[in-house]
Amino acid sequence: MYQPFPKSFITCTIVVLLFFTANVSHAQNIRQWIAEADSLEQVPNETASLHKLLMVLQYEPKNIYALSKSSELYSRIGKRMGDRKTSLRYYQNALELAERALAVNDRDDGARVSMAMALGRIGMTQSGKEKVKAAKEIKMHVEVALQVNPSNFKAWHILGKWHYEVSNLNVFEKAALKLLFGGMPPSSLTEAIRAYKKAQEFAPLFMLNYLELAKAQHRNGEKREALQHLQTVIGMKEYTEDDVLVKREAKDLLKSWK
């Protein structure tokens, strides 16, 4: 004789199906929001992209891509803020998110780069010992990122910037750096140029990299190459919100260097 399933079994089955459906829907939403964030970044609308990533983190607090990318966007947007106090608040948010990303996976190159960016931004607002301390940490994070992913163009760019800035430290800052490193870390404009060229190799449309490469070459006495890279910047298509400012600076430098 046919025996129907007990009600308890049917109830449990429905609960399991609802749970599975909810999880699938949740995962689809996360993927959709990340895709939308990436698209908005390309518009470019970095603030809207950041908001999408923060939505992801409300539901998946340990999503390492959302943590690293939102940290990066906080660093980039913060630099364009009109006052130091607001910028610093953005940089602190960037630092917190980068720390969370590293807590999820400290071997993720994106997390290491976002931390290096946040430290670099905060370092720009500081001087003396704090600035030098940030320099030491930045180099460590970038080196780990490149160990994990040697083709990470952002890591190469930050390494180039590190060499450029360290070569420009004053006597007191260099003395502090010697104490922290147990000796003066090797740095030079030549190494800065090499790192920028590696970044260019992996990301030929990265406009800011051409500008920073031009600055390093100009300081290193390579005026012709520096002017050529400024001309390259001026002729490039704008892809990010920073590119408008980068192109404006390139035009100003071109006038002053000629």
Image (cartoon, helix red, strand yellow):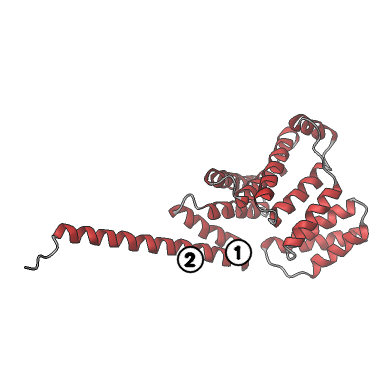
Quadrant in the picture for the N terminus: bottom left
Q: Position of residue 191 (x, y in %)?
A: 83, 48
Q: Is residue 123 visible?
A: no
Q: Is residue 205 above or below residue 115?
A: below
* Disc nearest the viewer among 2 and 1: 2
Circle on res. 158? none
Return the x and y of residue 233 as percentages of the image width and height.
80, 65
For label 2, the residue is: 32
Identified by mark 1, the residue type is Glu
Q: Residue at x 78, y 31 (%)?
A: 176
Q: Please name the residue shown 39% across and 64% down the image.
A: 25
Which residue type carries mark 2? Gln
Residue 155, given in percent of the width and then of the height, sits at 70, 52
Q: CA distance from mark 2 to mark 1?
A: 14 Å
* Image location of residue 227, percent across then percent down: 89, 62
Compared across the picture, whether 59 is left or right of 94 comes to left
